[in-house]
Amino acid sequence: MDPEQQLREACQACVRCPLAAGRHGAVVSRGPSGARLMLIGEAPGAEEDASGRPFVGRSGRLLDQLLAGAGISSEREAYICNAIKCRPPGNRKPAAAELAACRPWLDRQLEQVNPALVVLAGATAVEALLGVRGGLSRMRGQWQSWQGRWLMPVFHPSYLLRFSSMEPGSPRWHTAADFLEVRRRLDRLDGPTSGQEQPLPPRL
Ligand code: URA
């Protein structure tokens, strides 16, 4: 069995936290397991829980639009997952204990996919991976070097659903620009200077 399938089966059997009792199924990932870009969201919602695929509801459709707008194929170029694999009741924000219980699965995904670039969609993904709470507006759009990877926080698509404006300076405008920057860095991974770039200091 391939490692991704093993991971799926292990997650379906997981009872590390009480969310296991309320799930229809654990939601592990969509997109190629060899992608150079990993996008980490928060947690599955009702549609994700029912379908077993992350980001398939309203915010998922917006996410796909944002990726496509930057020329990134969500089917071919991005491995999409969440900080936790089971739906919290009423779509509440995951508790710190739930993030911690699910962290080994996220670590295994990072190890198996081994992405060069990681996009953290929303404050919960930032908290889950970096242990940093708050400050997303300051952190978004900035690359950080983290454990040999480039990592960028962006606004979560469900937050962006509250705004329709694409005016310069609006949250959607910033996020479109952030994904264009992700596209640029993906392209640079293949470029003549790949591997020579120095990590930028984190701007926290
Ligand atoms: N929001 C998320 O963070 N993840 C999903 O899979 C769906 C909505």
Image: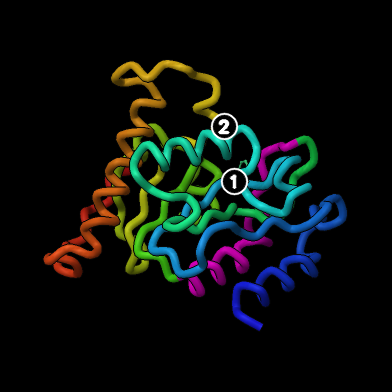
| Residue 97 visible to the viewer | no
Residue 119 in magenta stretch: no
Question: What is the magenta range?
Answer: 91-113
Give the number of callouts.
2
Residue that appears at 18% across and 66% down? 194
Q: Along the horizontal axis of the image, is 135 left or right of 184?
A: right
Label ID, residue 42:
1
Q: How is this picture coloured?
A: rainbow
Q: Three-letter amino acid code at disc 2?
A: Ser
Residue that appears at 50% across and 27% down? 160
Q: In which quarter of the image is the N terminus?
A: bottom right
Residue that appears at 33% across and 16% down? 167
The residue pinned by badge 2 equals 158
Q: Three-letter amino acid code at disc 1?
A: Glu
Ligand 1 quarter of the rendering: top right
Residue 100 in magenta stretch: yes
SS class, disc 1: loop
Which numbered disc, 2 or 1, marks the residue closer to the eye?
2
